[in-house]
Structure formats: structure tokens, C-alpha cells
Image: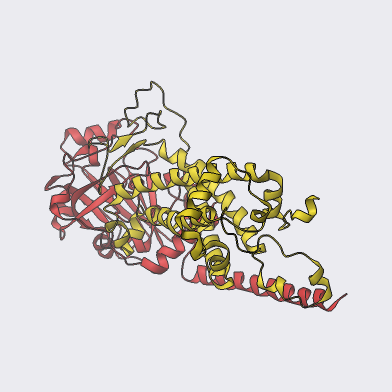
Amino acid sequence: MATLRPAQMPVDAMTPTSGVTAAKPAPRHFALVRITHWITALCFFALLLTGIEILISHPRFYWGETGNVRTKAFFQIPIPSSRDMVQTGYKYVLPDQNGWSRYLHFEAAWILVLTGLLYGIFGFFSGHFRRNLSPARSDFSWRTLFAEIAGHLRFRRPGADEASSYNVLQRLTYLLVIFVLFPLIVWTGLAMSPAFTGAFPATAILLGGRQTARTIHFFVSIALVLFLIVHVAMICLAGFWSRTRAMITGRADTPTERT
Amino acid sequence: MSTISRRKLIFTGLGAAAGLSGLGIAAHFAEKYRLVPPDGSGIYGLGETLTYASHRLLGRHALAREFSPNQISKPAFANEIAPPLGDAFKRLQAAKFADWRLTVDGLVDRPASFSLPQLKSFPCRSQITEIACEEGWSHVAEWHGVPLSHVLNLVGLRPQARYVVYFSIQPDWKESIDLDDAMHPQTFLTYGMNGADLPVPSGGPLRLRLPGQLGYKSVKFLTHVTVTDDLKKFGKDRGSVSIDAGYAWYAGI
């Protein structure tokens, strides 16, 4: 069993200023975390849907600066295309949805990036990252990690202590998504922009070129979809309504509530 | 009413007032520095305006990336255009484009029409740049031509000039750009590619090349350039076939 730290409370909730606030239990999630979580979720679905639409107009991937149907593909996804340029093996062409998909893709990306910046600034200064997401030094022992992984593999339902705090695997996963996958998908997206790479050429050059950026953008989106699947599966395992309610209203199920 | 909720009310009111006046200042600033694209309204207006405005603030004069000669794509790539080339084009092609003209008019002091040899007599510039399609593919070629700015300076832009609309000989194929892009040093009236005349599949004999934006702004078979102060004069599509087709007007992403 992992060593879990006591419930992580927002600082202001722990220092009651009046009798009114003292009676309220500390929220499971900060209000700003809850709001940015749902904006992120909405933007992510918009980006995923429109990303698929954009992808099917050319379901071939390349490595390096350039790539087109006359060059060797790194790989091709065996799906029909919405344009007739790529030889897909299918005898039909899907309806083309690129116009609105591109508009929405970039708009959702903007909202997501701005939301992410707000979350990042808040998380840094409020201590959210330090207290709620960074694992304790003791969490890094092999025994703790193995116990946590074994527990997950046995689909062990999380204990009551995990209703108010994250375990070490959760912490590491969230840190990976927030500080590696999201920055990487934004970077690889920007590296495909002809004007942005003009102003900041290193964004494309450091990655090895425009087509490499596009391919990594695709891989990172797959990783984020895998995260989403596991994320939702774990929520279902832990109790879909209690966890979802905690992220909407901030109220968590406490052991006293259950009895 | 308790002290807490009154304080909350005052702060909410102050916050809302600050937000509204902030929006007002932003709108004034955006208009003054021309940071709103022609399709900057509607449900996608926010995203388009943020993109266009940030590019204009951060990289108004930035050059698109250029490449070394060994990065030129081999074999050279050209995507065919969907509707077949019309009779007007075929007649000119049969005469080896001897009668090809580029008309430049609108808000200019001396409207003019140029033949290909005339355009080739102007200072020739070359750039090795990438052309990237919104579909996802791309290729690099060396493009030869005369900067559009040279020709616009020759005919004399009027002070009200704000946009340039350019037309293909193919019906209904036109695009529009702002003056920043029109006067950009890499915006070429392109007549050559990889050391030879620009091939027809690549847009020959004359194509507008704009490497800072996606390929769909680089209109092929160019015959007409007109300068304007207001794209609304060109109707709902704002002088751009991409807006008509539901695509973003500014393709610098």
C-alpha cells in the first residue's frame, strides 16, 4: 500500500476567516482546477474530432522536412481519405470537412493553450503542483511503486484515503500529461505553421523538420487518447459519480458521508 | 447582506468593469494596428483573430524559412488542380504564353499590364522555400520571380491601399492578402522553378508565391492583381475563394 499523505487542502480553506467558511468542508479540487479541467476536456474533444478530420485528408506520415505522395512514406494509416491524392486502396472518397475542422482546431487550440497557461500559473503559485501532483520522496521506493502497480493490475478499488489525494502513479501520469505531452503537442503543432516557424525557426529545426513535427503531433495525440481512456476507466473503477461530482462541485465523498 | 457578500459584489462589479473596458481598449488597439482578419467575426472569429493578431505583433516582417539547395525536393512535386484548365488558358499555352498578361489596377497611380518578358526584365529574386498544403504534405523548391512589392511600387500604391486581391485565369480562383504580405520580400510573382520556367502543373507561367502561408494562398496561373482599401467591396467571400469554401482567410496558422 502506498504511503498517502493527508488530504490536500487549499490553504485558504484551512485558515477559516469566519464562522461561515469554517463549517464548509474543504473542496476536493480547487475551483480553478475544476473550471480549467472542463474547459480542457471540451477543447480536447474538439481538437480530437477536428484532428481526425484533418488527418484523413492525407493519412500518410513522413519523417524529415518534406513529404508527399511522390516521396517514401514513414507509414500510412489504412483508412479511406477525404481527398483523392493519396492512394488508399478504397474506391471512395470521404466527405471533405477540412474547412470548419481547421477553423475549430486552431480556435480550440488557442482556448486550450490560454487555459493551460492560467492553470500552470495557478498550479505553480498556489502550491497545487508541489502538494497535489509531485510525488513524495518516499513514493520513489521500488516497494511503493511495485505495490501501486500490482494494486492497479488487480483492479483494486481505491481506498477511502484516495478520495482526497492522488497515489504515486496518478501523480506521475498527471505530471507527464501536463509537463510533457501537452507542451509537446503545442510545440509540434506550432512547428507546422509556416508563419510561426518563420518568426521562430528553431521550433521546426530542433524537431528535425515540418513532417517530423506532424508525425510526432500524431503520436502525442495517440498518447493523449490512451491517457483519456485510462483516466475514464479509473474514474469508473473508483466510482464514476462521486469522482465526477468532485470535479464539478468540488465536494468529495468522505468516509463519514458513506456511513 | 453580510460583509463577505457585499465585498464579493464590489469586487465582481469592479472585475466586470475592468474586463469590459479591457475589451474596449483591445478592440480599439486591434483596429488601430490592423489585427483583425476579414473573417475575424462569427464563431471562429476569436481563434482567427488571436492567430492573425499574434503573427502581426510578433512576426510582421519575419521571413519564412529558407533551405539549402540540397534540400530541394526530388522529384519536384506538383499537385494537379481539380477542374481542368479552361479554353482561355489552353489558347495562351498553344502560343507558348507569348500573349500572357498580368494586369495591375485598383488603388494605384498608374494601372498597368505586364507581359512575361517585361516581368522577367525586372530584378530577379530567388528563394528556396517550402510549400505546405493544408492537407499535410509539403515540398521544397527554388522559386524565381520578381517581388510583388517591386511591381506595386512601380505602379504606385495610393495611401488608402490596404489589401491586394489576385486572380487566376481559372474562373472563380482568387485570393486576397493584406499589405504586409503583399509588400513582404518573399512574396513573388513567380515565373521560374528550380532553374527553369515555372511548369504548368506548378502554376506556370505565373504564380503568386507566399511562403509564409499555406499553399492555397499561392494562386496559380496569375493574370490580375488589384489593390483595394476594403475587401467588403468584393462581396461575401472578401475576394478570397478560401473564405467562400469555408477556409481561413489567413493561412499562416
Q: Is residue A238 left or right of residue B184?
A: right
Camera-side residue: B29 or B104?
A: B29
Visual hue assigned to chain B? red
* x then y, percent, for residue B155: 28, 62
User: Relative to A165, is A59 above or below?
Assistant: above
Q: Which residue is drawn at 20% across and 35% down?
A: B93
* x then y, percent, for residue B9: 78, 73
Camera-side residue: B210 or A75?
A: A75
Q: Which residue is drawn at 24% across and 62% down?
A: B150
Quick one: which residue is furthest to the left in this view?
B195
Camera-side residue: B232 or A245?
A: A245
Q: In this view, does B124 lie to the left or right of B113?
A: left
Q: In this rendering, does residue B163 appear at all?
A: yes
Q: In this rendering, does residue B235 appear at all?
A: no
Visual hue assigned to chain A? yellow
* x then y, percent, for residue A240: 67, 44
Chosen colour scheme:
by chain
In the rendered picture of this protein, how many numbered marks are placed on residues? 0
Q: Residue at x 37, y 33 (%)?
A: A77
User: Relative to B193, is A23 above or below?
Assistant: below
* x then y, percent, for residue A251: 73, 57
Quick one: which residue is furthest to the right in this view?
B1
Which quadrant would residue A87 be assigned to in this image? top left
Camera-side residue: A107 or B94?
A: A107
Q: Which residue is drawn at 34% across and 32% down?
A: B82
User: Relative to B195, is B96 above or below?
Assistant: above
Quick one: which residue is furthest to the top in this view?
A91
